[in-house]
Amino acid sequence: KQEVTQIPAALSVPEGENLVLNCSFTDSAIYNLQWFRQDPGKGLTSLLLIQSSQREQTSGRLNASLDKSSGRSTLYIAASQPGDSATYLCAVRTGHTDKLIFGTGTRLQVFP
Amino acid sequence: KAGVTQTPRYLIKTRGQQVTLSCSPISGHRSVSWYQQTPGQGLQFLFEYFSETQRNKGNFPGRFSGRQFSNSRSEMNVSTLELGDSALYLCASSGGTGGGNTIYFGEGSWLTVV
């Protein structure tokens, strides 16, 4: 059974720092992995999608990497800003469907 | 282009009642899935529909059901509500047939059962 874990559970940093959020999954047979952010009381916003054949994806200050063999993905946030404060979730697809298995999330706070 | 739209946004129901939540996917998207989010269990998959057919189902009791219409809009229904059904219910849509596409979520429906 696929399990997805995120470390750390919470992170508080000053503005301007570069951050790394970690996501681990137990079964390397994934279809793809998607990173989301969730603001309090809101839905999920898609950040990056990495296909199983890809090693990384970039969007602006965000870079996500994927190492299927070790069951790990990282989300790198460059030059963090207070507006980055949110919960970050990773989710894996294990088959040819839209069923996502979510991680436990990392709650990020960036203070000025 | 409009995103995934869910209605109602907030609702309060009494134990034993039933509730129906609605989801309109992004225009052109044919796959709709539903998730339940609670503080204790996190985000859990409920079911997925594609072209009016349920393609996948999560590990929830039969009180939870859903359907998809020919215009891809979807509804989920929870019968005989229990206190533990209080949660944020999220709908998501994608344009692909086979899991390779980005999934987009709506703002969710907050259900409180009293």
Image (cartoon, coloured by chain):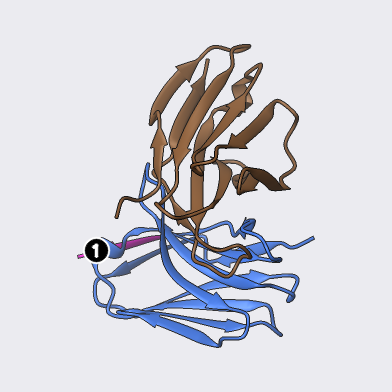
Chain colours: A blue, B brown
Q: How many labels sit on residues?
A: 1
Q: Taking B40 as reference, is A73 above or below it?
A: below
Q: Which residues are magenta?
A: A107-112
Q: Position of residue A110 (x, y in %)?
A: 29, 64
Q: Position of residue A100 (x, y in %)?
A: 62, 58
Q: Taking A20 as reference, is B48 above or below it?
A: above
Residue at 66%, 31% (x, y): give it.
Answer: B65
Q: Which residue is mark 1?
A: A82
Q: Nearer the viewer, residue B3 or A25?
A: B3
Which picture quadrant has residue A28?
A: bottom right
Q: Position of residue A88 (x, y in %)?
A: 45, 61
Residue at 61%, 58% (x, y): give it.
Answer: A98
Q: Is residue A80 left or right of residue B53?
A: left
Amino acid type indicated by mark 1? Pro
Q: Outermost residue toward the front?
A: B70
Q: Mark 1 — on which chain does it sit?
A: A
Q: Is residue A19 left or right of residue A80?
A: right
Which picture quadrant has residue A97?
A: bottom right
Q: Outermost residue toward the right?
A: A1
User: Where, quadrant-wise, is the N terminus of chain A in this rendering?
Assistant: bottom right
Does the magenta-highlighted stretch encompass residue A110?
yes
Q: Nearer the viewer, residue B30 or A11?
A: B30
Q: Position of residue A74 (x, y in %)?
A: 52, 78
Residue at 43%, 40% (x, y): give it.
Answer: B108
Q: Secondary structure at mark 1?
A: helix
Q: Taking B91 as reference, is A37 above or below it?
A: below
Q: State whether the magenta stretch is mostly helix, strand or loop.
A: strand
Q: Is residue A14 left or right of residue A38?
A: left
Does the magenta-highlighted stretch encompass residue B82?
no
Q: Nearer the viewer, residue B105 or B43?
A: B105
